[in-house]
Amino acid sequence: MGGGEAGRQSPSGSPPTIAPRSWVGEWPCACGRRYRVLVEPLTFWPRNSGTGFRAEPVETCVSCGADLEEAFALEAARIVLRLGI
């Protein structure tokens, strides 16, 4: 572990706990369709062209049919691996 990462550990040596919280942001599917994402519980709303976001959430991409939860998780895993967290 690098010197900068030591501060991220709790006194017991286990990873720090992340308080459950909801976070809203935007995320693009691999096909380019953008989604508004609520992380807790994981929910996706597709962006409509020029009119904002749909009122009802979806589970699969409205453009390519990808499972959004799976695609989001895979991208998050890649980021974690790249950052070495």
Image (cartoon, rainbow, N blue to C red):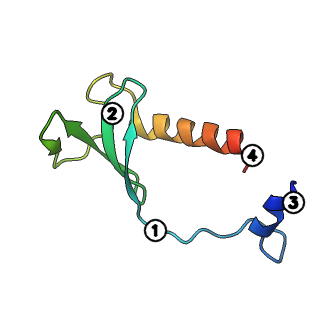
Badge 3 element: helix
> Looking at the image, which residue is at 50% across and 69% down?
20
Q: Residues within 10 Å of mark 3 (few under 14, many from 20)?
A: few
Residue 21: image tag = 1
Badge 4 element: loop
Q: Residues within 10 Å of mark 4 (few under 14, many from 20)?
A: few
Q: Distance between the residues labelled 1 and 4?
A: 23 Å
User: If you read the primary sequence from the N terminus, does the residue marked by circle 2 or circle 3 appear first?
Assistant: 3
Q: Mark 4 points at which residue?
A: 84
Q: Quadrant of residue 34?
A: top left
> Which label sits in the foreground, 1 or 3?
3
Relative to 71, is 41 above or below? Answer: below
What amino acid does circle 3 point to?
A: Gly
> Looking at the image, which residue is at 74% across and 65% down?
15
Residue 39 in the image, given as x and y percentages of width and height = 42, 56
Contact between labelled residues 4 and 1, with CB atoms less than 8 Å apart: no
Q: In which quarter of the image is residue 59?
A: top left
User: If you read the primary sequence from the N terminus, does the residue marked by circle 2 or circle 4 appear first?
Assistant: 2
> Looking at the image, which residue is at 43% across and 26% down?
30
User: If you read the primary sequence from the N terminus, does the residue marked by circle 1 or circle 3 appear first?
Assistant: 3
Kindly give the residue lying farthest to the front in the view shown.
Answer: 4
Q: Mark 3 points at which residue?
A: 3
User: If you read the primary sequence from the N terminus, does the residue marked by circle 1 or circle 4 appear first?
Assistant: 1
